[in-house]
Amino acid sequence: MFTITDKDIHMILSDYKIQAENFTVEELERYHYEEEEPESRQVRLIVKLNLNGGMPLVLRFKNEEDVTQETMEAQSRFAALLYEHGIVTPKVYASEGVFARCYTINGYDVTVMVEDFEDGEIKAVDLKTASETGQLLARMHNIAEEADFHVYSKVLFDPLDQNDLFSFDEFNKYKSELDAIDSELYHSIVQKYEWLVSKIQPIGKEPRYAVQGDISDCNLYRTQDGTLGIFDFNRCGDNQLFFDAIMQAVFEARLMDYSEELAGQHEEAVLSAFLEGYQQIRPFSKEERAVFPYLYALVSAFWLFDVKWSENSLSHAIETDDVDAVHQWMNEIYKRESFLLPMPV
């Protein structure tokens, strides 16, 4: 297992020109690759350094198959760009002109990044936070576009690629079963899917720019003066900015913890507040507003939680041979494909 010593930390801090004689180490996150593969040399470790008399720091140690040092450097440079332009985000530190520096520690090759630690993590979303998150994202989009900044890495929420919100491919894994249960309905769903995709594809041909890629309650924080800030650029990559805005808005409206005032009605209210806040800073074009209903229908119809993850998902119904439940899901998916929600702003 990857471990670090005080000597390792002193070496890193010295390279980053950070003075710290005494500190304590608090582990914030570790991915145990060795539990899946004992000989694995992959690493994901995040620690907090509590410095005596100084602001706490975060050290990130990574060696993962899908992340290169070049990607981590670009992600850090994007965070630094946002910081320089007034976005509230932790300061990232450079060493000899680079943010992501390579080391061999305890026999592991790792890339290290150092940044300030920020407290005040948001635990639940309310309407004020949703609106401010939309505004924050719009400012970040404006900065990325004006700087023509790119990270050249995939993101979690690209609707024209594999993403973490919805998946037609997961639905279509069961093509033979679905076709056998109701061939006409199955083919209607596929045709409707292809039609919806055709409606959003023109936007997908527009330029892509760097995005933080994972705005969520656990990646948002408030400073002591109440300003909303953002950290964790681990999923930073390039996306079409309208796609990022809508997918992030849906994510915040469906998959976070919410204040008591939003109990039972959070999706519509949070979605509206987020998009209204975004548009205050970066108004949507006529073409973008026209595309929204088709993108939202795609997300809703093939929502991964319903298709794959929940206990009563379509996948579970197929695997347990519950034909009635499968047919109900097919009807529900087609219904969602056909419901074109106007942009709620």
Image: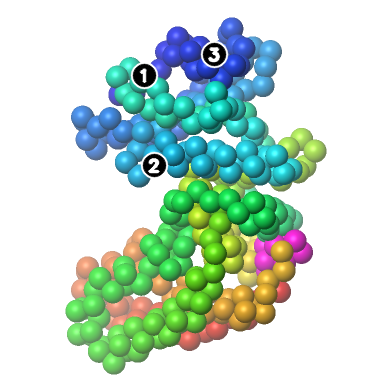
Q: Secondary structure at mark 3?
A: helix
Residue 140: x, y in percent?
66, 52
Q: Which residues are magenta?
A: 272-281
Q: Is residue 338 above or below residue 329?
A: below
**Residue 26 image offset from top left, x and y in percent:** 51, 22
Relative side of 260 to 9, left or right:
right
Residue sitting at x 38%, y 28%: 110
On the rendered image, what quadrant is the N terminus found in?
top left
Is residue 109 visible in the rendered image? The answer is: yes
Label 2 crowding class (10 Å Cα cut-off): few <14, some 14-19, many 20+? some
Which amino acid is tagged 2?
Val
| Amino acid of disc 3 | Ser
The CA span between labels 3 and 2 is 25 Å
Which residue is under mark 1?
Answer: 105
Of residues 106 and 316, the one nearer the viewer is: 106
- Under circle 2, the secondary element is loop
Q: Is residue 89 magenta?
A: no
**Residue underneath mark 3:** 14
Q: Residues within 10 Å of mark 1 (few under 14, many from 20)?
A: some
Q: Position of residue 222 (x, y in %)?
A: 71, 41
- The residue pinned by badge 2 equals 67
Q: Is disc 3 surrounded by few (<14), some (14 to 19) or many (20+) residues within 10 Å? A: few
Q: Is residue 281 above or below residue 181?
A: above
Q: Is residue 11 left or right of residue 84?
A: left
Q: Residue at x 49, y 37 (%)?
A: 73
Along the line of sight, the residue nearer the viewer: 284 or 310? 284
Residue 274 magenta-highlighted: yes
